[in-house]
Amino acid sequence: MNAIIVESVLFIGLLAVVGTLLVSALGITPFGRRIKQTANRKRIDKTAELTCPIHGLQREEDLVRLPNGEPLCPLCYKEAVHGDIS
C-alpha cells in the first residue's frame, strides 16, 4: 500500500516538474516568442479598432456598428446623423 502511495506522489511530482519546464521553455524558444508576439499583435489590433482618430479610445460597448459591419465612434455617429454638435 505504501508503495502505491509513494509511486503516485512521485508521478504527480514528475508531472509538475515537466509542466514547469514546458511553461518556462515556451518563453525562451522561438515557438514561445511567436505565441507572445501573436498575442501582442491581437491586443494592439483590438486597441486600434477601438480608437477613433478624432475622439480617441472608446469602449467596445459604446461603438455603433454600421450596416457594412464597420465600427463607428458614438460621437462621430451623432455628428454624421445630426450634424455638427458642439
Image: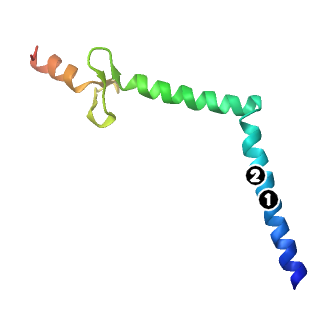
Determine the image quadrant of residue 27.
top right
Q: Work out whether residue 59 or residue 8 is closer to the camera in this orientation and state it.
A: 8
Q: Position of residue 31 (x, y in %)?
A: 74, 32
Q: Which mark is residue 15?
A: 1
Q: Amino acid at mark 1?
A: Leu
The residue under the point 90% across, 79% down is: 3
- Residue 83, position as x, y percentages in the image: 10, 15
Instruction: Rate crowding at label 2 as few (under 14), some (14 to 19) or many (20 or more) other CA atoms within 10 Å.
Output: few
Judge from the rendering whether residue 82 lies leftward or rightward of residue 57; answer left or right: left
Q: Amino acid at mark 2?
A: Gly
Residue depicted at 83% across the width and 66% down the height: 11
Q: Secondary structure at mark 2?
A: helix
Q: Is residue 4 left or right of residue 49?
A: right
Residue at 17% x, 17% y: name it.
80
Q: Judge left or right: residue 41 versus residue 67.
A: right
Task: Give residue 19's mark.
Answer: 2
Which quadrant of the view contains residue 34? Answer: top right
Callouts 1 and 2 close, C-beta under 8 Å: yes
Residue 17 figure quarter: bottom right
Mark 1: few/some/many CA within 10 Å (<14, 14-19, 20+): few
Instruction: Out of 74 and 23, give the one closest to the viewer.
Output: 23
C-alpha separation, residue under disc 1 versus residue under disc 2: 6 Å
Coordinates of residue 46 in the picture (x, y in percent): 44, 28
